[in-house]
Image (cartoon, rainbow, N blue to C red):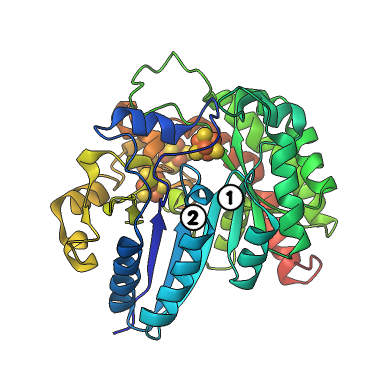
Amino acid sequence: MKRNLSLMIKPSSSKCNLNCKYCFYHSIAEARDIEDYGFLKEDTLKVIIEKASDYCNGGSCVIGFQGGEPLLIGLNFYKKLIEFVKDFGNNTNFSFSLQTNGTLITDEWAEFFSKNNFLIGLSLDGNKDIHNLNRVNYKNEETFNKVMRGIKLLQKYNVEFNILTVVTSALCKKIESTYNFFKKNNFKYLQFIPCLEPLENTSLTSRKFSITKEEYKNFLMKLFDLWYEDAINNNYVSIRMFDNILGLFFNQDYEACDMKGVCSCQHIIESDGSVYPCDFYTYETYKIGNILTDSFNIMHRNTTTINFLNSSINKNSKCNSCKYYSICRNGCRRHRENQVNNLNYFCEAYYDFYSYSIDRFNDVAFKIKTRKIIL
Ligand code: SF4
Ligand code: SF4
Ligand code: SF4
């Protein structure tokens, strides 16, 4: 039987050449017994490819690389990956993506990504001022110029990439200039993720970088206005959250895990081979197995996996009677942590945003169907 699988590998564990002030993976690593599992070994990579091939048996396997900074392990690791896929991949269709801070990209990396069809996610928070506020190295030096140099190399080699932006309070005050900056640079595939408070911070009032509901609501509305204006003027900018909502009007379900309303097992593989269900939960207590000793089938049947998935099933009575439930679904489980009755921290922001935008989503969908908007 053919099956599909998606994996997220952390080849450099939590190691990173940057020290972004809001880094959620640093907070997770610091809270674990083992902060850094070292670099992933070639033997482990070989086992991953073999087991993924066996499991998929001719289906599709999407492998993402993430960190920490996944380029720190060096290019030879990825060359080995391509070799292993050729040698042990059977007829499984492998595809690759990689999330990077972009500062270590060279001609050699960009050429490799292009040749092997890697989809690159680039972390960039906006223009120089916004980006440099939080995205700094260990000497507290700014990184904007290095990231832009990396992006230019990706463009030079025609590598497909999208931009990942962390939404902070500072960014919420500069939505229009940030959006315009991306457009001016022809960055038309964007993803915005609200800055997270570490899971360990159970206080609902003391928030350092994460945004308030009010800020997120205003951010979504303003961003939507800018996006809508461009969409109806046939200048479509892809914003992952909005693309997902638009897809509902075409009978497509969400592809973004954080919008589906229930968790799915994303197989996050740390460099020692240990596997976790989600990037937000790479703590020992959520470990569902180790790729070196367990099969995917065994990990899927593991009680920790089943409990993790089941606990994301929404039981909030407010949601059950909410008119936007089919769109919102109580959002990502991670945003329900430490909240009363498991209700999403951004509930009010979502509710007001959907009231504000849904008719215009419908309008954009209608114009796409009638070819007044060409994507
Ligand atoms: S680049 Fe990513 S992993 Fe590295 S410090 Fe910044 S947020 Fe953390
Ligand atoms: S916590 Fe969010 S991103 Fe993680 S598996 Fe659950 S829904 Fe998906
Ligand atoms: S808007 Fe609030 S009540 Fe409605 S589904 Fe979303 S989280 Fe639940």
Q: Is residue 370 above or below residue 276?
A: below
Residues at marks 2 and 1, CA–CA distance in whole angstroms = 8 Å
Residue at left 29%, top 48%?
313
Residue 264 appears in the rendering: no
- x, y percent for residue 269: 33, 54
User: How would you rate the neighbour count of disc 2 (Cα within 10 Å): few for under 14, some for 14-19, many for 20 or more?
Assistant: few
Q: Is residue 364 left or right of residue 293?
A: right
Quarter that holds the C terminus? bottom right
Above or below: residue 340 compared with residue 93: above
| Residue at image coords 61%, 64% | 113
What's the residue at 49%, 38% (across, down)?
16
Amino acid at dot 1: Met
Label 1 beta carbon within 8 A of ligand 2: no
Location of the N terminus (image quadrant)? bottom left
What is the number of callouts on the image?
2
| Residue for badge 1 | 241
Read off the residue under disc 2. 256
Task: Name the foreground residue: 36 vs 120.
Answer: 36
Amino acid, disc 2:
Ala
Would residue 239 appear left or right of 181 to someone viewing this image?
left
Name the spot of residue 149 as percent of width and height, x first.
75, 46
Instruction: Determine if residue 267 is in view.
Output: yes
